[in-house]
Amino acid sequence: MAYSGSMAQENIAYQAKRIIDVDQAFDPSAEWGVAILEDNHLVFEHNYERPFAAADINNLAIAQALDHTNTDLNREMVLQETDYRQNRGILQHFPLGYRLTLGAAVRLSLSIGDSTATRMMVRAGGGPSRINTVLADLPLAVTRLTEYLPRDNSPEAKFEYGSTNAVESLWLLHHNLGTPTGAHALYHGSFFNGLRRDLEPVKPQLTRTQLAEKLASWMPGKAPAALYDKLVSLSLPLPSTVANKEGAGWDSQHDVAKIGRYTVAALSTSNIVESERTHHSRLSQAKLGVLLQQAA
C-alpha cells in the first residue's frame, strides 16, 4: 500500500508495521486489525476491516446508538437486578434501586468500563436487538451486539459480547467525542500505559476513579444515597485533550484512542492464554501510543 504525505507519516507506517511484526514473532497465532489516521488522512492500515469479537470497546457503539435516537440523557434510571454484572466498575457494589441519570451511566461505561452501567445503557436503548437495528442505520457493517439469555431464564436478553473492526472503532470514537456524553475524555484503555507519567491531565482522573472503585467495594450493603452519589461524581471523566477506550476478552485485546492529531485503533486476538497475551498486546499498544505521542 502506498502512503501519501510526509516522511513523518511514512515513518509512522514503518514503525507501526514493525510493532505488529514483533508481536506476531512472539505469538504467530496473533492477528491484528490496525488503522491510524492523522486528522482525516489514513497513515497506516493493517487488516482494518477484519471483524473481531468485541466487549467493552462496543460501549462506544451503544452510546452512539443512544445519541442517534436522541435518547434523553436526563432520564432517571433505577438499578435493577438484571443490570448487575460482577466485573468492573462501581455500580456492581451499589444497592438495588439506586437512581442515577442515563447520562451518568453512559459516562461511567465510557470512562471506567463500568459493566453494570453498560447493561443499563442497553436496557435504555431497548435491548440488544433494538440497538443493532439502530447500528445498521449507521455506516457500521460489522459493529453489532450479541444477545444471550441469563441463566435464570429471564425473558430479558442481556448482551455480553459483540463484534467490530478497526475502521468502525475509529468512526465510533470520532463521533462519540462530538456528543454530550463524549465531550469529556475516555480514559479506560491501554494505549496510555506507556504515557501516563507524561500526561498530566490523565493523572487526576486515574486517582479519582481508582479511589472511587476502592471505596465502592468497601461500602456496606446499604449506605446513604449521598455517599453513592459522591462515588459516581468521582468516577465521571474530567475534561482533557486525550481519549482512550479499551475492550478485552478471553483471547482478545482491543484499544482505540485519540492522541493529539492522530486517531488509532488496534484490535488483536490470539490462541494463547489470556494473561500472557493481554500483557504482550498491551505492551504493543503502548508502543503505538508512544510512537504517536512523539509524532504529535
Image (spheres, rainbow, N blue to C red):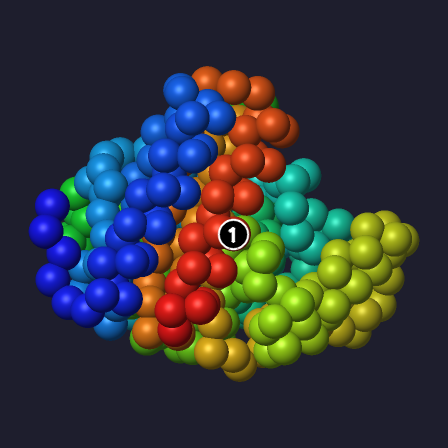
- Residue at numbered disc 1: 286
Point out the image quarter for the N terminus. Answer: top left
- Residue 140: image x %, image y %? 19, 49
Task: Look at the image and tell me in which quarter the C terminus lies.
Answer: bottom left
* Residue 112: % across, % down: 59, 58
Rendering quarter of residue 43: bottom left
Q: Position of residue 10 (x, y in %)?
A: 23, 58
Residue at image point 31% right, 57% down: 12
Q: Is residue 239 visible?
A: yes
163 up-or-down from 90: above or below: above
Q: Quadrant of residue 157?
A: top left
Q: Is residue 42 left or right of residue 186?
A: left
Residue 68 visible? The answer is no
Give the left or right position of residue 169, taking residue 43 as reference.
right
Residue 169 lies, in percent from the top left, at: 31, 52
Q: Is residue 210 left or right of residue 132?
A: right
Using the image as rendered, state which of residue 90 and residue 99 is in the foreground: 90
- Viewer-proximal residue among 150 and 250: 250
Residue found 67% across the figure and 72% down from its top: 203
- The three-letter code of the residue at mark 1 reads Ala
Q: Above or below — where is 217 with respect to 128?
A: below
